[in-house]
Amino acid sequence: MKINPCKNNVGAIIDTDLKNFTKETIGLIKDSVNEYGVIFLKNQKLAPRDYINFAKQFGQLADYPMLKGLENFPEITVVEKKPGEKIMFGEGWHTDSTYTKKPPMLTMLYSVKTPPKGKGNTRFASQYLSYENLDEEYKNKIKDLKAEFSADGPISKTRNNRTAEKGTGIDPKSLKAEHNIVRLNKINGKKSLYLSPGHVTKIIGVNLKESSEILDYLFKHQIKSEFIYSFEWEPNCMAIWNNHAVLHNPVNDFDEHRVMYRITIQ
Ligand SMILES: [Fe+2]
């Protein structure tokens, strides 16, 4: 199995066939996701059943509270932008479902239909690097802080086209959670920043002025260009990322139909 780190050491491209995985491949993929934050695999021909079977090797599959899944395969959420639509689902920097009490650790995204190569990329920002590059004083200041994450945060409007079609009827205002903004990956000892402009509404336990100062600073810091890798999709690619280690942001620069199948894992 070949592992080639991407630009800025954010993400790695792995060469293996996911349909015929072995225990060893799964172990190496888990290690690589922890190390690089995100990994990419190209030329994977996976039917929904194969995809679910592969995903189950990583843990319990999570429900996505806001949308119903793919017909006959409720574990798969269809992430789609249709021709003529202006808004793209999930546009803006975020990590997935952080407004739940126990957000999914891993996300898998498999490309079914993509715009021409170089359009509709997904950008990933390493939050290992963003934490590492804070100065010591700032690290100290934020080490015990928690933030409030809401499903009704700024990114929620990008969901409206899809919830109109296959929403579950859950009111996004009812989904809120508090999490530490610095996380420790117990497997490799790396710390990461865990917050995003998409879902975070405030820092807990400080006044509003201080909360917005901290958020303004960190939101800008965590997406500096030296922490980012932009993945170019083509059909049959798989990305697997650790939601504690990277933020992601799909680029809305195309009009073609884009269809991705997503599975999240606890
Ligand atoms: Fe997302």
Image: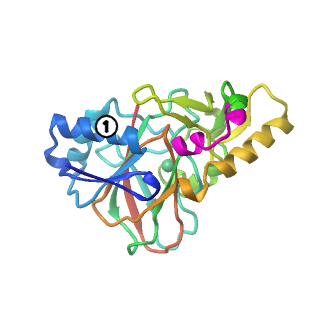
Q: Position of residue 127 (x, y in %)?
A: 54, 43
* Magenta part, dominant SS: helix
In this orientation, which residue lies closer to the viewer: 43 or 263?
43
Q: Position of residue 61 (x, y in %)?
A: 35, 34
* Residue occupying the point 34% across, 59% down: 111
Q: Position of residue 265 (x, y in %)?
A: 38, 35
In this orientation, which residue lies closer to the viewer: 102 or 78?
102
Q: Would residue 246 appear left or right of 30 to someone viewing this image?
A: right
Which quadrant of the view contains residue 115? bottom left
Residue 133 in magenta?
Answer: yes
Tally of numbered tags: 1
Where is 122 relative to 204, above or below? Answer: below
* Residue occupying the point 23% across, 38% down: 26
Amino acid type, mark 1: Lys
Where is 104 relative to 71, above or below? Answer: above
Query: Any atom of ligand 1 within 8 Å of the CB at mark 1?
Result: no
Q: For the magenta stretch, what is the residue range?
A: 127-139
Residue 233 in magenta?
Answer: no
Where is 105 relative to 16, above or below? Answer: above
In this orientation, which residue lies closer to the viewer: 258 or 129?
129
* Residue occupying the point 58% across, 52% down: 93
Q: Would residue 186 appear left or right of 73 to someone viewing this image?
A: right
Q: Position of residue 73 (x, y in %)?
A: 30, 44
Q: Quadrant of the C terminus?
A: top left
In this orientation, which residue lies closer to the viewer: 70 or 229?
229
**Element marked by disc 1:** helix
Q: Mark 1 highlights which residue?
A: 30
Mark 1 closeness class: few <14, some 14–19, many ≥20 residues within 10 Å: some
